[in-house]
Image (cartoon, helix red, strand yellow):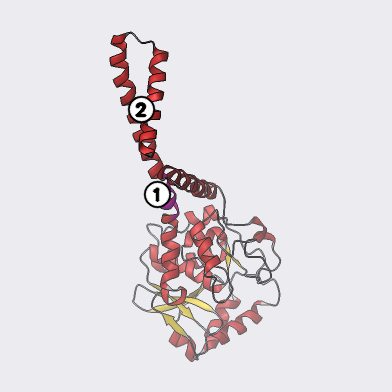
């Protein structure tokens, strides 16, 4: 296979990848069926659409940090469904990032599937809100990314069976938010661990409506997760997701455009120089043969023959 054929094949491959990326720009990660899935934990789980949710993530000019954190906790809760059914195919609700969204992540998931068999949890809040579902960990990851975009310190808290977020207040004290339920608990983890019943009223008074059981049932069940044994506050989300996975997610959205262009550029250079050489050849023959009285059709025939000779000499 000669050099020209390699460049052509590379350009075709790059064009294919580029078309996939362009197609993905017009596709949404969210499957509308999630709005009506009866396997979600809550009734009417999503009441804020993606476009409105993104616009509401911005901190208002006169809004205090505490009010903003409270609003974000409810926003994430109202914009994402609590759903992760293992019986559902990975590509139905995009548990696995689809080819048209990010072919790099798609291939990475095929080659290196998550150890627990689950699909990817997204660290970019815009992508998480767009997909529109997840468990407590996905809600918490989205909330942390939103808060950090407004320079508010927030950390992931891994309880025994549940994941929440701890946020640093203006007076440098920490408190808990649970974006999976849309609530704020004005105590730090240490205080709650000493008396887990403190959280029960906040869950009972939450705005969620369970699809089954009662608020009291969930409040008592979740309060047990705050028991002291095994709770961990992670200094960074990389301790939960893994640094490589974070770099893959963030870097691949830029690289997915870079690779196709890298494949196409050699072909563009080849086309440019071929066109320039052809024009230079045409101009050179035109001037000399014009003085000899050769017709335009004759000039084209000479250029064609000359290019054929040049191509033959290169092959030799």
Q: Residues within 10 Å of mark 2 (few under 14, many from 20)?
A: some
Question: Can residue 313 be spotted in the picture?
Answer: yes
Circle 1 Cα neighbour tier, 10 Å, few/some/many (<14 / 14–19 / ≥20): few
- Gap between marks 2 and 1, in whole Å? 25 Å
Mark 2 or mark 1: name the one nearer the start of the chain.
1
Q: Which residue is mark 2?
A: 278
User: In this figure, which residue is indicated by the disc labeled 1?
Assistant: 262
Q: SS class of the residue under badge 1? A: helix
247 or 126, which lies in front?
Answer: 247
Mark 2 secondary-structure assignment = helix
Rendered image: mark on residue 220: none
Q: Which residues are magenta?
A: 256-264
Q: Residue 308: where, in percent of width, then height?
A: 40, 29
Q: Is residue 70 magenta?
A: no
**287 left or right of 106 in image:** left
* Residue furthest front in the image: 316
**Identity of the residue drawn at 53% across and 88% down:** 196
Q: On the rendered image, what quadrant is the C terminus found in? A: top left
**233 is higher (above) or lower (below) than 91:** below
Q: Is residue 64 visible?
A: no
Quarter location, residue 273: top left
Q: Residue 209 falls in which quadrant of the image? A: bottom right
In this view, the residue in front, 46 or 142, is: 142
């Amino acid at each position: 296979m000669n050099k020209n054929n390699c460049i052509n094949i590379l350009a075709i491959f790059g064009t294919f990848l580029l078309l996939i990326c362009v197609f993905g720009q017009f596709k949404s990660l969210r499957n509308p069926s999630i709005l009506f899935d009866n396997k979600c934990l809550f009734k009417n789980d999503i009441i804020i659409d993606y476009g409105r949710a993104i616009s509401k993530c911005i901190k208002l000019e006169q809004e205090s940090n505490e009010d903003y954190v409270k609003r974000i906790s409810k926003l994430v809760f109202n914009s994402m469904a609590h759903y992760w059914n293992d019986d559902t195919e990975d590509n139905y609700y995009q548990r696995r990032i689809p080819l048209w969204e990010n072919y790099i992540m798609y291939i990475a998931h095929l080659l290196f599937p998550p150890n627990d068999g689950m699909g990817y949890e997204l660290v970019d809040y815009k992508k998480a809100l767009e997909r529109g579902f997840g468990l407590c960990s996905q809600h918490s990851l989205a909330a942390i990314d939103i808060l950090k975009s407004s320079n508010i310190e927030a950390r992931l808290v891994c309880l025994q069976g549940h994941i929440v977020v701890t946020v640093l207040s203006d007076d440098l004290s920490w408190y808990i938010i649970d974006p999976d339920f849309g609530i704020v608990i004005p105590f730090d983890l240490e205080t709650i661990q000493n008396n887990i019943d403190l959280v029960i009223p906040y869950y009972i008074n939450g705005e969620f409506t369970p699809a089954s059981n009662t608020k009291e049932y969930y409040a008592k069940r979740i309060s047990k997760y705050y028991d002291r044994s095994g709770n961990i506050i992670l200094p960074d989300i990389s301790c939960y997701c893994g640094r490589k996975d974070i770099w893959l997610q963030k870097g691949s959205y830029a690289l997915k455009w870079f690779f196709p262009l890298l494949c196409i550029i050699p072909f563009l250079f080849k086309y440019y120089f071929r066109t320039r050489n052809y024009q230079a050849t045409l101009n050179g023959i035109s001037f000399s043969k014009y003085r000899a009285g050769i017709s335009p059709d004759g000039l084209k025939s000479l250029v064609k023959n000359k290019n054929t000779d040049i191509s033959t000499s290169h092959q030799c």
